[in-house]
Image (spheres, grey):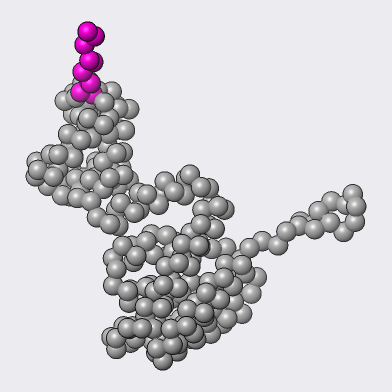
Amino acid sequence: MRATATPTRNTPDVIAETLIAEIRGGVFAPATPLPTERELCERFAASRPTVREALAQLQMRGYAEAGAGKRPRAALPSITSILKGTGDHIREILGDTESGAHLEQMRQFIETGAVREAAKRADNAQLSKLQSALEDNFAAIGTACFATTDIAFHRALVAVVGNPVILALHDMFVSTMIAHRPPTDDARRYDQIAYEEHRELYQAILNGEVLAATDVMDRHLTRSYRARLQVPKITTAAGDQPES
């Protein structure tokens, strides 16, 4: 019979699993620096690319954090760290345009569900936070701060659900998406429309009108996304060059 080959000890998977076991076992406490690449190369008799791939696995799985120019530090996985790594990979795989469309669809599911729950059971403290966020949104109309207050209003709404996974998804994807949207040709007019829709949402939640709140949110998100889509180029006559 043929002998089964024994896996070598210097593969990225083996190095990563060994370090993860040591982090979970307390050998490396959270926030403490991990060994240098040189030390890991010597310990596992591995090349630098192999060690770097192992460290990348640790980061993706939430067991390491790395800052610019600093050694990776041990960490324990959290919802935020895992979703952040996953989100970066999703954006790389899908590309900017397709990624944006998928994220908009995800946002629609999250926020229409959130506004439905908010209309059903938002308590006085949560309503107060929504009102405060709405007032800040009104004060920021026509200024560079409007996007920030827009994010804060929607985050306060999603927070009513009380689900940390949903809130982490919102923070990782939706907030980033809103912050990086291209500018409109008439920012003040766009801000005023968005604010009025936010006001309608708040009023429906305050009144406990589930269907109305859901309908307003659906219209708000659809209009917001489509308002920023580029108009297709046109030709004035056969053979003419498209307008820029």
On the image, the x and y values in percent for residue 190 come to 59, 76
On the image, the x and y values in percent for residue 59 come to 28, 44
Left or right position of 158 against 94: left
The quadrant of the image that shows the C terminus is: bottom right
Tag count: 0
Left or right position of 28 against 197: left
Point 31% across, 33% down: residue: 53
Write the start and end of the magenta stretch as one range: 1-10
Residue 233 seen in the figure: yes
| Vertical relation: 91 (above or below) 197 | above
Residue nearest the observer in this picture, 27 or 218: 218
Left or right position of 198 against 128: right
| Vertical relation: 22 (above or below) 77 | above
The quadrant of the image that shows the N terminus is: top left
Residue nearest the observer in this picture, 122 or 237: 122
On the image, the x and y values in percent for residue 36 come to 21, 34
Taking the view exactly as shown, the residue that stands out farthest to the top is: 1
On the image, the x and y values in percent for residue 219 come to 56, 76
Point 62% across, 69% down: residue: 227
Taking the view exactly as shown, the residue that stands out farthest to the right is: 238
Point 36% across, 83% down: residue: 120
| Vertical relation: 134 (above or below) 64 | below
Q: Main secondary structure of the magenta part?
A: loop
Quadrant of the image occupied by residue 118: bottom left
Residue nearest the observer in this picture, 166 or 208: 208
Quadrant of the image occupied by residue 205: bottom left
Taking the view exactly as shown, the residue that stands out farthest to the left is: 26
Taking the view exactly as shown, the residue that stands out farthest to the bottom is: 207
Point 19% across, 50% down: residue: 76
Q: Is residue 222 magenta?
A: no
Residue 138 seen in the figure: no
